[in-house]
């Protein structure tokens, strides 16, 4: 059996291109004592993968040249020499961009319980890291409370769309999205039920934020960083909370970005800006998944997945996140036989 | 009786100059029912005064053209038609840059209890807003804990010097100051007992911060903003807390500053950046003043005041804060007969 995998060939400058990664073949990894062999079914394509390609400090070490691209993914256990995994288990973990991956006791995968009533794509979207990030970012880091005026960037994206819908369902005074293009903005309002959505491709975003939220912004969930974050800082309310989840506008930039100049507003408004990583909330994932599952089942939480077929298209799928060409949570199907029971 | 006062003649662009303010004379204000007349003795010169001169949103409205420059100050009550103030009381409040001020039930002044054993300048420095800002910024906003690696900018300044000394006294693993010039840096280490002090006038502050704090910065108390804040962001430890107290590097700038580009480190380090205003802690001032007074009396907390004589020199005194020409807490003596009993 072979294991096709995508390795980092060269660190990208700006956008990932055909020279950045390389599809290579090799033998399926051998399963040693304490390990389990996983047949990868689906990959989660997230902006953070782009940050791991840089030789820069981050929350994980950079991907090494020649190493498989680090990525979340789901698969099925086909062989196990560990008590943690049984053959046939559907598991989620850091599979990497490849057909076969090893789970172990140190490199742990999560067993996805069968009979959840969701397909794998849904499980990897709203019930997976994406939905969990939205949930804990809003409720815990952002300390959301009913009556808050909430602004979410990347509002049509996988995380942002969930943030806004949960805020709305839990009694936000107003939920305003920010997205790229008229079509996405319309969808955010009409399909996802946000009160308003601003197109960041149009000029004067700071002024339009002020018009949309004249009473100030209580909670901002930031997926983009850069100029939009700065515009929001200029419009925060007293004791505002800014949740820094991502900075997608910065990940591909080649020049030094313009930088934030409105941080002194944190003083005037006694406000807080805080970053987080979803892994820190692992002990509470089940609590959130129950809440999210309920909302999906009763129709309160709408979700959409953008499926890309074939491991070899993973680099293109990653670029979709930056061009805005995706429509919902981006997932790459590596083996469509792997499904949730 | 006349009341000399300094009014805002023109909004400054950059540094305050001779056209910004105007010394004018007029009658002493009349004391109405519910008010008390205060003979101003000493003014507190703080960087925030410069921000109030701009026509920009802030935590207080801008000073109007023709209005007395807003400022903290202390004085003695000479006439009272209010139960809150007795003739002879030494009081602290927003006196403005003038010889006479009115306290009332809405524009409240704090009565400074007699017999504290401190002179007025000490009371206005470490026991006043400056010391309280340092105390609550470090302990509450910064959630200081023993073992923290603490960095303080404006380390030779009124607030920064107190922050570092309290952190040191309470068991910081390391306290590193940032100050302007060799002389100030030497003083911060030798006289105030910081472990190290970096001169921000020398190049490569980010690299020197890394060398001084190779394990990362747990708590940063920021008085300056701008490039130094950005350099610190690049060197924060996991769960770091950045206390935004001031941004003096930005207050006089005429061009758009370079801006912060390292805020995505808040994600990688799960860190928090928070602004605050000391007025929000009013109910707990006494608690902090007791702690600070004890440290002053037992010699743990060193303090220094930079006294400038004469109301007419208040604008120059304000500029000292930006040139770094002051040496300790800057106070303007308006009437040296006003003293603590």
Image (tube, coloured by chain):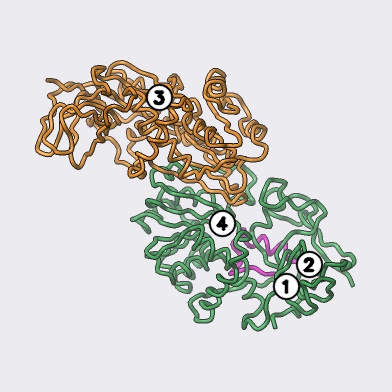
Chain colours: A green, B orange
Q: According to the image, label 1 marks what residue?
A: A91
Q: Are marks 1 and 4 on the same chain?
A: yes
Q: According to the image, label 2 marks what residue?
A: A103
For discs 1 and 4, the disc positioned in front in the rendered view: 1
Q: Chain of mark 1?
A: A
Q: Was residue A90 drawn as part of the magenta stretch in this picture?
A: no
Q: Which residues are magenta?
A: A312-333
Q: Chain of mark 4?
A: A
Callout 1 secondary element: strand
Q: Are marks 3 and 2 on the same chain?
A: no
Quick check: B243 left or right of A108?
A: left
Point 76% across, 57% down: residue: A18
> Where residue A263 sits: x, y (%)?
47, 43
The circle on residue A245 is: 4
Q: CA distance from mark 3 to mark 1?
A: 61 Å
Point 62% across, 44% down: residue: B237
Q: CA distance from mark 2 to mark 4?
A: 27 Å
Write down the quadrant of residue B174 in the picture: top right
Callout 2 secondary element: strand
> Where residue B66 sits: x, y (%)?
22, 30
Q: Are marks 1 and 2 on the same chain?
A: yes
């Amino acid at each position: 059996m072979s294991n096709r995998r995508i390795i980092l060939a060269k660190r990208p400058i700006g956008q990932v291109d055909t020279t950045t990664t390389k599809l290579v073949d090799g033998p399926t990894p051998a399963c040693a004592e304490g390990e389990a062999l996983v047949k990868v079914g689906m990959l989660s394509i997230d902006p953070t993968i782009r940050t791991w390609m840089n030789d820069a400090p981050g929350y994980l070490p950079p991907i090494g040249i020649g190493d498989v691209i680090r990525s979340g993914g789901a698969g099925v256990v086909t062989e196990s020499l560990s008590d943690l995994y049984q053959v046939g288990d559907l598991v989620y973990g850091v599979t990497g961009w490849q057909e076969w991956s090893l789970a172990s006791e140190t490199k742990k995968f999560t067993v996805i319980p069968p009979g959840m009533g969701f397909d794998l794509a849904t499980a990897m979207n709203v019930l997976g890291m994406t939905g969990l990030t939205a949930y804990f970012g809003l409720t815990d880091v952002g300390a959301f409370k009913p009556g808050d005026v909430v602004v979410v960037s990347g509002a049509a994206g996988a995380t942002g769309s969930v943030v806004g819908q949960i805020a709305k369902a839990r009694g936000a005074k107003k939920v305003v999205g920010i997205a790229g293009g008229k079509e996405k903005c319309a969808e955010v309002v009409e399909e996802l039920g946000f009160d308003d959505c601003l197109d960041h491709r149009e000029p004067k975003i700071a002024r339009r934020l002020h018009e949309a939220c004249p009473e100030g912004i209580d909670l901002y969930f930031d997926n983009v960083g850069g100029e939009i974050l700065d515009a929001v800082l200029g419009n925060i309310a007293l004791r505002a909370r800014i949740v820094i989840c991502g900075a997608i506008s910065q990940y591909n930039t080649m020049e030094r970005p313009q930088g934030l100049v409105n941080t002194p507003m944190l003083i005037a408004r006694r406000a807080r800006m805080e970053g987080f990583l979803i892994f820190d909330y692992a002990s509470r994932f089940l609590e959130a998944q129950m809440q999210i599952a309920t909302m999906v089942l009763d129709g309160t939480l709408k979700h959409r997945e953008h499926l890309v077929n074939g491991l070899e298209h993973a680099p293109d799928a990653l670029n979709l996140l930056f061009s805005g060409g995706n429509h919902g949570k981006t997932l790459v199907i590596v083996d469509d036989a792997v499904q949730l029971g």
